[in-house]
Amino acid sequence: MSLDRSRRRRAVAVPFARTALLALLLSLRTTCGFQPPPLPSPPFRVGHQSASTTHLSAKPSKKSKSKSGGGFGAGGGFGSKKSSASAPADPSKVRSVSGYTGSGTKVLASAANNFDRIRKLFGKEATTDVYVRSPLNDESTFWFVGKVIRMVEGGENDDELVGTEYPTEAEAILSQKRLILEYAKNQLRPQNMGGPYSKSLELWSAPGDSEMDVVQNKVALVPIAGSSKSLREGFNVNDVGYNPEIYVGEEKEKGGLRVVRDAEGRPVKPAFEVALLPKTTFTMSLRPSTAPPIQDMPPPGGYKKIDFGRYLPDRGPKGWQLWAGATTLILYGYYQIGKTNQARVQQKMQERKVRYALMPLMQAEADREYMERELVNLRREAEIMKDVVDQQGNKWVPGSSQFFGGQWMPRKIGHFMPKY
């Protein structure tokens, strides 16, 4: 008993000591860079489980897969689900979405509200138009995807700045790069920017509210390069906003505003002017009179009375005549319905009388047919029960029953009917 007890104590104490030793060596490696050698496995077993050593290492654990699609400038591209080793984007500097359906709705609403707020403060001067090019789809087409706005220095609205640095045009676009591209490829033109085309989308800019000048080939587009790492330390995303382009009607299928440019954003065709309607000027031939206006008045004695009677001849019967005619038609219709109902009742009564007259004949025919079947059944019963006797030795009487009662009832003959 004492030997078994000591073995059990040893089986419990040895794993505990080895666990404490491993924890001590792991802490030494973390603090001092000490590399512990692997411990040898003990030559004994405890119960039915092996006491093999589990080697621990202080290697850093793998980062979990990022759901933000790789962030800005990651190797997975925009909207990809690959893992990224970079740190997550700072929400105070970047407006990003996860790439999943519906993830950017609140972010887009926040950006649009910021755009309206800053637009009221600084107007057109703080606005920048944004275009997207999809080289894998069409290298020469630039799609208009909306406008960005930023807080600018000067004026009476300096206290509205959230960060410590005024944003530049590039920072206003780069901080919302993921939001703009996700909206463009998922909502505006997925057939031109989504799917396999989304890996190489490019952002380009133009002066604010310059859509007409861009269409007339008067303005060149400027590429926007960089990522969220290009943002300065004092930048804050609440100092910029984004107003997305919205397609309506045929634009959803045919597409909205887009222009053709070369690889450097310059127009490939010469500038042109849009023909506008000439402004019409009205010149007065005479100087307006200063005399009081003359009011048209009726002639003395008033206008003549207009006789409307000759234009309103008698157009039909009077009202009481219409009521009398309608009442007559209704009463005549009810009279015809009553006669039809009486004729139907008489017809049904005649049919019932015919059935009553034929009932004895039909019953006699049924009785005769029953007697014929009964005679056949009695003969079959006599043939089957010819050797059957009761306890007193009496033979079976065909047609007799084991039930006794004072009321006659036809017996079931279905079991005795021959199967033809």
Image (cartoon, rainbow, N blue to C red):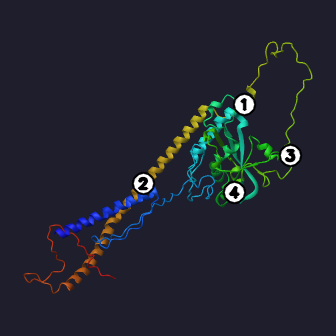
Q: Which element type, helix, strand or loop, lies under badge 4?
A: helix
Give the spatial CA distance, label 2 vs label 1: 54 Å
- Residue that badge 4 annotates: 192
- Residue 392 visible in the picture: yes
Give the spatial CA distance, label 2 vs label 3: 97 Å
Identity, as a three-letter code, of the amino acid under mark 4:
Asn
Between circles 4 and 2, the one closer to the viewer is: 4
Instruction: Report how many numbered discs are placed on residues in the image.
Output: 4
The reply to whether dot 4 and dot 2 touch (C-beta < 8 Å) is no
- Residue that badge 1 annotates: 313
Q: Residue at horizontal 45%, vertical 50%?
A: 341
Give the spatial CA distance, label 1 vs label 3: 70 Å
- Residue that badge 3 annotates: 272
Could you say where residue 251 lies in the image, as x and y percent from the top left? 71, 50
- Residue 244 visible in the picture: no
Identity, as a three-letter code, of the amino acid under mark 1:
Pro
Identity, as a three-letter code, of the amino acid under mark 3:
Phe
Q: Which element type, helix, strand or loop, lies under badge 2?
A: helix
